[in-house]
Amino acid sequence: MSMEGEMKAYRVAILVVCLTLGSCLTALAAIPARGASGNGTDDIAPYWNLFGPTTALPRHAGTVSLRIQVVCTFQKVASALDAVALLSDSNAPIADAGSCADGAYTFLYQIQSNVKNLTVTINNLVGFTPDVNVPTYGVETCDSPNNTLELCSNVGAATTTALNQLAKITATINAANTKVVFCVPKVPVFPAGTPSQGQGLTLVVLTQQAPGVPVSYPKITFK
């Protein structure tokens, strides 16, 4: 084969790799981990559990099982705070029900799947600032016996195989900070936690939105 032919074949091979890997090609590091204990404990759940966990929903032509939960990151569920305020002020405003009073949201997505090389995209993010030191995205772990009501991954009891699979999951974030793409070569199988912690890979994204309603909910898609 001529030099020109070899270069053409090389370019074609690179193109095939890029088309195969897609957005996963640019992922550089494993996803950070965040503990569920950061959101609060069971005894004050009305102040942090805004919505869910939902029952398992079939997605991606039934090949993915998805559960969702929305948490007020700093224990400021508006309706809970409003109920306390009404005890001393009958005119306390309650128009922000269904929101986090400070606009700080934790979105949790727990998945189970046998699909290999699964791409999970969480987009339409509003108020998302990537941070790996105080993680604002990544995997949510079950790190405390005092929070059994939040979706999380039971990594503490995981097998070596599951932990190795977790370490291979990567994430990329677009320049506008409106989308996180998780590339999952194999979805780890974690032991079940308590019934409310669920079982599966629990992905998390935190946003800081303007207080009040409406709330901007992200969208999750699979490929």
Image (cartoon, rainbow, N blue to C red):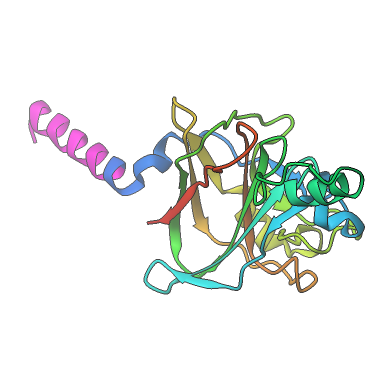
Q: Say which quadrant the C terminus sits in.
A: bottom left
Residue 139 position, x and y percent, is: 66, 49
Question: Residue 2: within the magenta?
Answer: yes
Q: Nearer the viewer, residue 67 or 8?
A: 67
Residue 173, percent from left and from top? 49, 33
Residue 2 is left or right of residue 189, and the answer is: left
Residue 136 image point, x, y percent: 66, 36
Side of 20 relative to 166 (left or right): left
Against 124, residue 97 (above or below) is below
Q: Would you place residue 223 above or below residue 13 in this image?
A: below
Query: Which residue is at 73% across, 70% downward?
Result: 191
Q: Write down the quadrant of residue 89 in the picture.
A: top right
Q: Looking at the rendering, which quadrant does residue 69 occupy?
A: bottom right
Q: Is residue 214 above or below residue 152?
A: above
Would residue 183 be counted in the magenta stretch?
A: no
Start-end of magenta stretch: 1-17
